């Protein structure tokens, strides 16, 4: 594969984290960074040994120093940069969530029209654990009829961008709930269609941001996905349970991996008193985030690999939009305690 020279639009926490992942990945290197302020871009460039700094993402897109753009900006401005990158014939990796399903479709159409790859910034789907579960879904689980997931953590800084409803309108449901929706997309049968949605939302009394959400997605084949996400949990929770007629998979850290890059799965089957369980370790030399940039290089080189990633983004955003709309109908303020 050709090495992709990445231009990073944005210099926040996720951009700093992903700079290290790009360096770890094969067929990837950082060619440039852009920020609204040149000083900030130069500081980022010095920190991560980036050769080019811009105070305009459009100038970075127009330059010949990059082949692909990683858009690590607030949700409210993400679409415009993604489309501009595609129109500049640069491959596009956009952080999630997106503003809406129509927004995603406009981005995807721009990428298709300009013959460039598109992918969202979901890490866990690139780890071999996810691929192993999906390839053995029927063997291990039979007919999957339930996916239950929770992603909760404590975000105490009310100055964080995720507490700004203008920049991140969906708050916790967009930021953390995206992963709940993606779990349903990845682990339920690929042809399921959404039927009904129920959801609840709590808002932060100080900022008005969506503080937590919970709900149920019902699909036309009878399967369901229950989900819970939030910014005010007393501990980090990344639980996933996939239930099928032939077995159950439990993962207590479905968004991360072990220090050596591997990831674990607990597989259970059998009835009362006769059940068995097996701890499965799936090896990987790199974390899912680094493998994401390698998969992006593969999609850039081979157009036949692109549609799977575009479709997954569209399906995830469709579920997120449905959950967000339902949650707004039953939202509640957070308790004073």
Image (cartoon, helix red, strand yellow):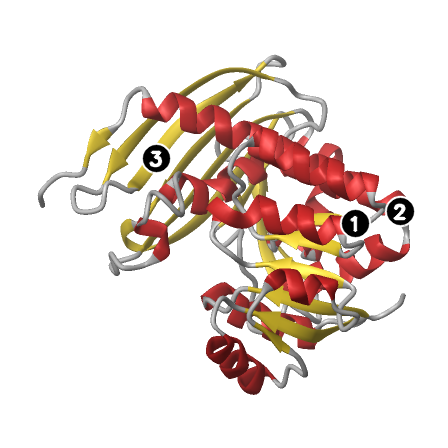
Q: Residue at x 81, y 70 (%)?
A: 27
Marks 1 and 2, the one that precedes in the sequence: 1
Q: Where is mark 3, residue-wise?
A: 213
Estimate the spatial distance between the alpha carbons at disc 1 and disc 2, rounded to whole Å: 7 Å
Which label's residue is closer to the chain start, 3 or 1?
1
Residue 98 percent location from the top left of the image: 54, 41
Disc 3 to disc 1: CB gap under 8 Å: no
Kindly tell me whether residue 216 is visible in this rendering. yes
Q: Is residue 235 above or below residue 108?
A: below
Specify the quadrant that holds the N terminus: bottom right
Residue 243 shows in this picture: no
Q: Position of residue 161 (x, y in %)?
A: 36, 55
Q: What is the CA distance from the residue labelled 3 to the residue labelled 2?
A: 37 Å
Frontmost residue, 147 versus 82? 82
Using the rendered view, name the quadrant where residue 189 is placed. top right
Q: Quadrant of the C terminus?
A: top left
Element type at mark 3: strand
Q: Residues within 10 Å of mark 3 (few under 14, many from 20)?
A: many
Q: In the rendering, which numbered label is found on residue 117?
A: 1
Foreground of the two, 103 or 22? 103
Q: Considering depth in this image, is 19 or 246 the residue closer to the camera? A: 19
Residue 303: give its label.
2
Would you say the residues marked 1 and 2 are in contact, meaning their CB atoms lie under 8 Å apart?
Answer: yes
Sooner in the amino-acid sequence: mark 3 or mark 2:
3
Instruction: Please determine whether, in this image, residue 315 is positioned above or below residue 110.
Output: above
Mark 1 Cα-neighbour bin, 10 Å: few <14, some 14–19, many ≥20: many
Camera-nearest residue between 255 and 248: 255
**Which residue sits at x=53%, y=36%?**
181
Task: Say which of marks 3 and 1 sits in front.
Answer: 1
């Amino acid at each position: 594969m050709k090495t992709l020279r990445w231009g990073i639009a944005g210099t926040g926490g996720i951009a700093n984290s992903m700079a290290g992942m790009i360096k770890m990945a094969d067929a990837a290197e950082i060619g440039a960074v852009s920020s609204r302020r040149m000083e900030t871009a130069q500081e980022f460039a010095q920190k991560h040994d980036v050769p080019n700094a811009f105070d305009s993402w459009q100038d970075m897109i127009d330059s010949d120093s990059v082949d692909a753009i990683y858009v690590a900006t607030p949700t409210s401005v993400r679409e415009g940069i993604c489309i501009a990158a595609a129109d500049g014939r640069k491959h596009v990796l956009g952080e999630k969530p997106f503003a809406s399903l129509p927004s995603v479709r406009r981005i995807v159409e721009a990428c298709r029209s300009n013959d460039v790859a598109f992918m969202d910034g979901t890490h866990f789907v690139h780890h071999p654990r996810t691929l192993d579960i999906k390839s053995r879904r029927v063997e291990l689980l039979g007919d999957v009829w339930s996916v239950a997931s929770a992603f909760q953590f404590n975000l105490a800084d009310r100055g964080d961008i995720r507490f700004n409803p203008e920049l991140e309108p969906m708050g916790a449901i967009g930021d953390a709930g995206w992963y709940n929706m993606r779990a349903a997309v990845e682990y339920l049968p690929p042809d399921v269609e959404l039927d009904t949605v129920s959801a609840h939302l709590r808002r932060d009394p100080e900022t008005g941001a969506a503080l937590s959400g919970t709900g149920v997605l019902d699909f036309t084949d009878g399967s369901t996905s229950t989900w819970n996400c939030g910014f005010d949990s007393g501990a980090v929770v990344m639980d996933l349970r996939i239930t099928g007629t032939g077995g159950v998979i439990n993962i207590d850290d479905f968004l991360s991996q072990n220090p050596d890059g591997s990831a674990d799965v607990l597989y259970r089957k059998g009835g009362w008193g006769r059940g068995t369980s097996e701890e499965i370790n799936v090896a990987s030399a790199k974390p899912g985030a680094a493998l994401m940039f390698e998969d992006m290089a593969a999609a850039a080189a081979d157009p036949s690999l692109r549609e799977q990633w575009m479709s997954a983004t569209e399906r995830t955003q469709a579920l997120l939009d449905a959950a967000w709309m339902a949650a707004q109908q039953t939202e509640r303020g957070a308790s004073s305690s």
